[in-house]
Amino acid sequence: MKVGIIGMGHVGASMHTLFARHADLVTYDQKDGDTYPQRALQACDFAVVCVNTPAGPGGECDVSHVFDAVKRVPAQRVMLKSTVPPGTTAQLAEATGKEICFSPEYVGESTYFNPVCDDPLTMPFVILGGEQAIRGYFLDALVPILGPTKAYFQCTAAEAEVIKYMENAFFATKVTFVNEFREIAEAFGADWHTVREGWLLDPRVEPSHTAVFANAPGFGGKCLPKDMTAIIAAARAVGASADLLSQVVRSNERLRAAL
């Protein structure tokens, strides 16, 4: 098997780790200034696109790098890992005539140890969104690498795109929630760490994203801020309400202003 990886940032490096022992790899990242490996990519069975999707001037997701990468890569089959608004994968498939599967990435930015997010081999599930034929193709490619104990969830591309934004929006909301509760606890003279540990005794409360860092309040990084504004913009574009998410962004801006 020969696999092309377009975009060698955090996600691309994770995909390199995933496929390195099982495939011949061809990698390309525009920022490196290398010559585009057209001939080598033509020989690939499929390409994995991991280019960045920055926020546009109105907070919307800028998918121009994704469109450029998918159009340029000569592979007919593409696994898209870049986070994109619902409907983008279908638009790409129509515009290029290629078979495209959106498979959201779950590579975390945590600086503390988190084996699930640091190593794609330890992630207990894979989501494949797209037409049935291309989902089946990538299942055949991934199962020999990831093994039979993973959960392989299949759905439409739009459903997978919503799933990805829903997760990141949930994490952003959760971080904002616990940051505000630390402020509330301390305003009452309560120790936040005691409050948090007592709260987490209830097994229904999952501890991920409940740490509040005294010197880094709110959520930041490369993903959550841009993904929050992107899904808000995408929701409004189709007439859906995003009032809660909009308030989360405003609350986080207040928290981050203290930095």
Image (cartoon, rainbow, N blue to C red):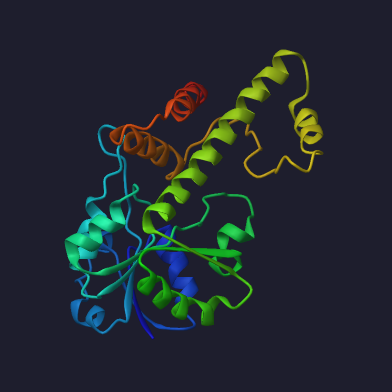
Tell me the quarter of the picture where residue 39 sits.
bottom left
Q: How many marks?
A: 0
Q: Residue most toward the front?
A: 132
In the image, residue 107 sits, relative to residue 1, either above or below, namely above
| Residue 69 in view here | no
Tell me the quarter of the picture where residue 242 sits.
top left
User: Nearest the camera: 75 or 209?
Assistant: 75
Left/right of residue 90 with respect to residue 161 in the rendered view? left
Q: Quadrant of the N terminus?
A: bottom left
Task: Give x and y (percent) for residue 188.
Answer: 75, 13
Residue at 32 percent across and 81 percent down: it is 45
Residue at 61 percent across and 23 percent down: it is 180
User: Nearest the camera: 20 or 159?
Assistant: 159
Tell me the quarter of the picture where residue 206 sits.
top right
| Residue 92 in view here | yes
User: Nearest the camera: 95 or 224?
Assistant: 95
Task: Give x and y (percent) for residue 133.
Answer: 36, 74
Task: Give x and y (percent) for residue 20.
Answer: 46, 78
Residue at 44 percent across and 25 percent down: it is 243
User: Nearest the camera: 158 or 110?
Assistant: 158
Left/right of residue 237 with respect to residue 39 in the rendered view? right
Residue at 51 percent across and 50 percent down: it is 109
Task: Give x and y (percent) for residue 8.
Answer: 36, 64
Left/right of residue 135 with respect to residue 66 in the rendered view? right
In the image, residue 72 sits, relative to residue 109, either above or below, namely below
In the image, residue 234 sits, relative to residue 140, either above or below, namely above
